[in-house]
Image (cartoon, helix red, strand yellow):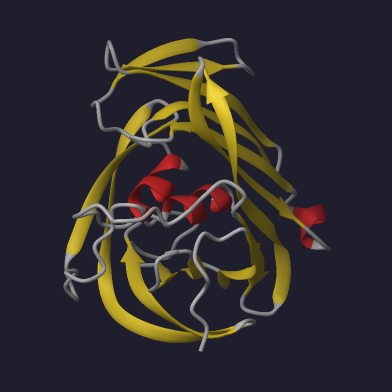
Amino acid sequence: MRHYLACLIVVIIFNISYPQEESSFKAGEWLKFKLSYSGWFKAGYSTLEVKNSTYKNNPVYHVIGKGWTTGAIKFFFKVNDRYESYFDKQSLKPYKFIRKIYEGGHIKNRIIYFDYEKNLAHVDDLKTGVKKSSSIQSDIQDMLSSYYYLRNYYDTNNIEVGSSIELKMFFDYEIYNFKLKFLGHDKIKTKFGYIKCLKFRPYVVADRVFKEEESLTLWISADRNKVPLKIKADLRVGSLIADLDSYKGLKHQLEIQ
């Protein structure tokens, strides 16, 4: 389960082609996901919240992502994660990214500052006191800003079934190539009713957590919100599922049938 929250957030990333005429989100949006093991055993919750803020006198969106285990599972593997991103309201470029996690005794506390004049990402490890800088491209995104950036630039009309796309994202000290494949249109039952969605297959690294590269499946609402509705991860032992459990502050009404 280590880094599972990170994986869940990372997989909420998909292709961009043309800008939307209208933004898909606004400050005040709040999403809550229920995590369950093998479809029935409650494992925890995660939330994503968008706020207005400023960074070096520039108006920005401040997104806060949290994840934590609940019930009996926290006695075996306690998770208490917090991610934050400050990104520009116009370009949606990230300025600052915070990762503060506790996962089964594994602790990280890092801040990333993005310097676009020098095309560098400055990583400050608050736990070890180590500071490093890495080269980046001018269009780089962090783990949280990626999702909101792509929500505003995703062309749902021209995507083709079976097409694969890639995206570069800076995480910790490296640039990652994230790849996923569009599986087609779907309609799933949620606690709110049936919702039309877009189905994706993100590619992950097969390791001691994931069974194979194609272990993840992602469902995104096929409306102007483009919010994640469901994520399923096939693990070496059992599976983990994240379902949208509650929401508020959406810019557009969620299209429920």
| Quadrant housing residue 20 | bottom left
**Quarter of the rendering occupied by the N terminus:** bottom right
Q: Estimate the x, y position of residue 114 in percent, counting from the top left.
A: 39, 20
Where is residue 252 drawn, in percent x and y? Answer: 49, 65
Q: Residue at x 45, y 29 (%)?
A: 172
Is residue 87 shown above or below 118? Answer: below
- Is 122 located above or below residue 175 in the figure? above
**In the depicted view, which residue is nearer to us: 4 or 194?**
194
Residue at 61% in and 76% down: 38
Horizontal arrangement in the rendering, residue 64 relative to residue 119 (left or right): right
Q: Is residue 49 above or below residue 249?
A: above
Question: Between residues 178 and 117, which one lies in front from this camera angle?
Answer: 117
Is 234 positioned to the left or the right of 16 in the image?
Answer: right
Q: At 52% from the left edge and 83% from the top edge, which residue is drawn?
A: 256
Q: Residue furthest front?
A: 21
- Residue ID at (48%, 85%): 188
Q: Does 116 appear above or below 49? A: above
Please state the horizontal and vertical placement of residue 62, each as a whole percent of the image. 56, 35
Q: Position of residue 138 (x, y in %)?
A: 24, 26
Work out whether residue 235 can be spotted: no
Whether residue 90 sits left or right of residue 25 in the image: it is left
